[in-house]
Image (cartoon, helix red, strand yellow):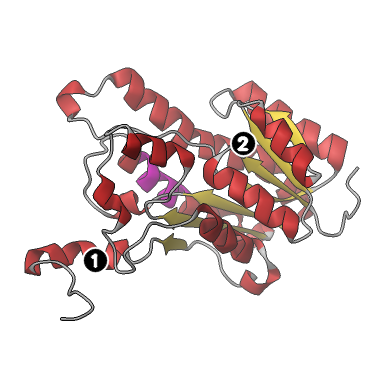
Amino acid sequence: MVQNENVGVAVITGGASGIGEACARELSARGVPVVITDINPRGKDIADSIGGYFYMLDVTEDENVNTCAASIESDLGPVKHLVNCAGVLQQPLAPEILPMEIWDNVVNVDQRGTYLSSVAFAKYMIEREEGSITNIASITANRSVPLHSYAPAKAAVVAITECLAAEWGPRGIRVNAVSPGHTLTPALESAINAGKRDPTLLIQNALGRMVKADEIAKAVAFLISDDAAAITGINLPVDCGWLVSTSWTTYGGLRKSND
């Protein structure tokens, strides 16, 4: 069992890297008992480094998800918070050359995996009439982009968030989403270095820089905290001002600081 049962356990799917890892480290630093779940065994090293716990989990496998949720509840006590970070990226390919295997995998992990994990852990939260679920969506859910599987899947995550917030709010469960802008994770940095993503991602927003993973984690920490006790069903962009900047290209782009 965890040391501080009053705080409640926080489960992070996809916690072995990127935003998920940042969330695990941020919540642990705030005294929240953290459980990292992932298909990547590196998650155990991260869990060990922060005094947390690790469970292997494939969010696309129904039985695995339900068994994992039951095991964590039995082994460690009540799960108070779920953070759905498990996700895969997609190259910006034209639809006619985007393999359906890639399309299906993105939807299975990013969309279906978020829903499946939410339902599996919410079953226990419903019994206690307490809990929070925070889903990692994306700013691509709000704009037209050449990510023909990833963007629709993340838009579905936002819709899932809103639907579940209304469904489970009367049972004491808050459901919110965070939509990161272009975040400088190792995966994206590797794609930029390999020439697979445009390096101008670094500056195409109002603040002229990319989002840091720990900045996403701080937003998640706020949403699961008592400070956000009246907040549910929202989608919080953390994007350095990308959403407010893109339409300015019609007018020649953002003004320079000396204009």
Q: Residue 28 or 149: which is nearer the viewer?
A: 28
Q: Is residue 215 above or below residue 230?
A: above
Q: Which quadrant is the N terminus positioned in?
A: top right
In the rendered structure, find residue 245 and report the number of the disc placed on it. Answer: 1
Q: Is residue 76 left or right of residue 35?
A: right
Q: Pick the residue in front: 173 or 170.
A: 173
Residue where numbered disc 2 is placed: 16
Q: Who is closer to the viewer here, 214 or 147? A: 214
Residue 101 placement: quadrant: top left
**Percent position of residue 136, x then y:** 49, 49
Is 175 above or below relative to 63?
A: below
Q: Position of residue 96 (x, y in %)?
A: 15, 24
Range shown magenta: 153-160
Element assignment for label 1: helix
Q: Is residue 74 left or right of residue 136?
A: right
The reply to whether the magenta stretch includes residue 180 is no
Specify whether residue 252 is in view: yes
Looking at the rendered structure, the kind of residue marked 2 is: Ala
Residue at 65% over, 70% down: 229
